[in-house]
Amino acid sequence: MLDQNLNILIKTLPGLEKVLARELRQLGGREIKEIRRAVVCKGDLGFVYKCNLWLRSALRVLVELERFQLRDENHLYKMIRNIEWEKYFDVSKTIAIDATVFSDRFRNSLFVAQKSKDAIVDRFRDLEDKRPSVDLKSPDIRINVHIQKHHCTVSLDSSGESLHKRGYRVEVDKAPLSEVLAAGILGLIDYQGKGPLIDPMCGSGTFLTEAALYASNVPVNVFRKKFSFQNWKEHDSELFQTIFDAALAKENQVLPPLLGFDIDPRILAKARRNIKNALMEEVIKVQKRNFLEWPEDAEIPAGATLIMNPPYDLKIEADIPELYEGIGNTLKQHFSGCTAWVFTASAEGLKYIGLKATKKIALKNAKLDSWLVRYDLYEGSKKNRD
Ligand SMILES: C[S@@+](CC[C@H](N)C(=O)[O-])C[C@H]1O[C@@H](n2cnc3c(N)ncnc32)[C@H](O)[C@@H]1O
């Protein structure tokens, strides 16, 4: 059963493991260990609830049920059938299996998912003469089967839909960032929610909304309606409500300026709707502005951090050299004293910024190799290519 000492595995995006481990430490996780694209730790059911509500850089939170050395496919079937599924969920719930396989012995993940599903269904049929239905799109219960060489781990997915679906973003446009990636990047740049933040190419407003949720100390998944753990037999709705209410009581009312700009008014209208959904319209201010024509008299809050995700591929139809050269010029002319971070998948574009980078972090944006690059803009910063 789901006891006090659960083995919890939290999945994240590549490059965000350290940020996630830091979040887990702050949340009170025990025995935290970073692994590839995930962090493992120990905790109880209440901690699983907290992880789902609070973790900004998490994709999903898995609770381990069984771990064993796998011999062959019949052994997989037998071991999964032996798990007391009827203690975890009712036969009326719909199920789906996520299988990940890194092993020569097993044919493919689809086969493993099928075999695991058969084992669970057969157990219920034997016990109750009924079987749970499969719903691949929106199941009540998600089960994760992970095979690495001959090690097999079977877990319950407490999140259900990926945690990047916060519930506030309904409007997106050209190349929006995943909320988890945006939050993870804010973690990587060590944004503490204290100083002013400017996103001059804000698109649908993801960086700003994530920053506002962080600065206001509001759990990032407060707007989310559904978590898979709500369908578990052992779900303790009173405990969840207590944790939820306690989280809301921690809200911070004093927030730094959070400013967004974009050249495209159509995108800004979408950003405003998302920001409103996150109840941050009083906090985040967005307006139309071409970054390459930054007005001489525009006020910039002292000590501001800039974060931007400029267009980076042909899909967005940008003239990459001209755009990135313009970005470098604007940063140099108008933002001395600030720190700027550029996140892009355009290696070519970065060459045209022409400022000395003080840090470069390799990441992925979906499947694209991307870089998060820092520029410290001192008075009289020299353009590299001058
Ligand atoms: C990759 S998208 C940013 C996506 C954003 N991070 C999000 O999560 O939705 C790039 C944005 O830069 C804007 N943009 C392009 N050129 C610009 C310019 N010269 N000044 C301001 N914004 C610009 C585009 O309209 C687009 O919204």
Image: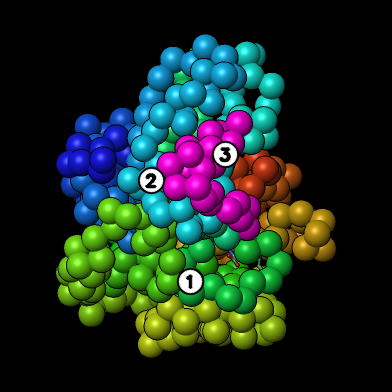
Under mark 2, the amino acid is Glu
Distance, label 2 to label 1, CA atoms, is 31 Å
Which residue is the site of mark 1? 167
- Give the image location of residue 94, x and y in percent: 53, 56
Q: What residue is pinned by disc 2?
A: 86
- Note whether ligand 1 is within 8 Å of mark 1: no
Q: Which mark is residue 117?
A: 3
Q: Is residue 253 above or below residue 156?
A: below
* 272 and 108: which is toward the camera: 108
- Residues in magenta? 115-137
Image coords of residue 294 (percent x, y): 60, 76
Q: Nearer the viewer, residue 317 or 333?
A: 317
**Mark 1 → mark 3, Cα distance in angstroms:** 30 Å
Q: How many marks?
A: 3
- In front here: 322 or 346? 346
Tags 1 and 3 in contact by the CB under 8 Å rule?
no
Residue ID at (39%, 33%): 83
Q: Residues within 10 Å of mark 1 (few under 14, many from 20)?
A: some
Residue density around tag 2, few if under 14, some if 14–19, many if 20 or more, within 10 Å: some
Please state which amino acid type lies under the numbered disc 3.
Lys
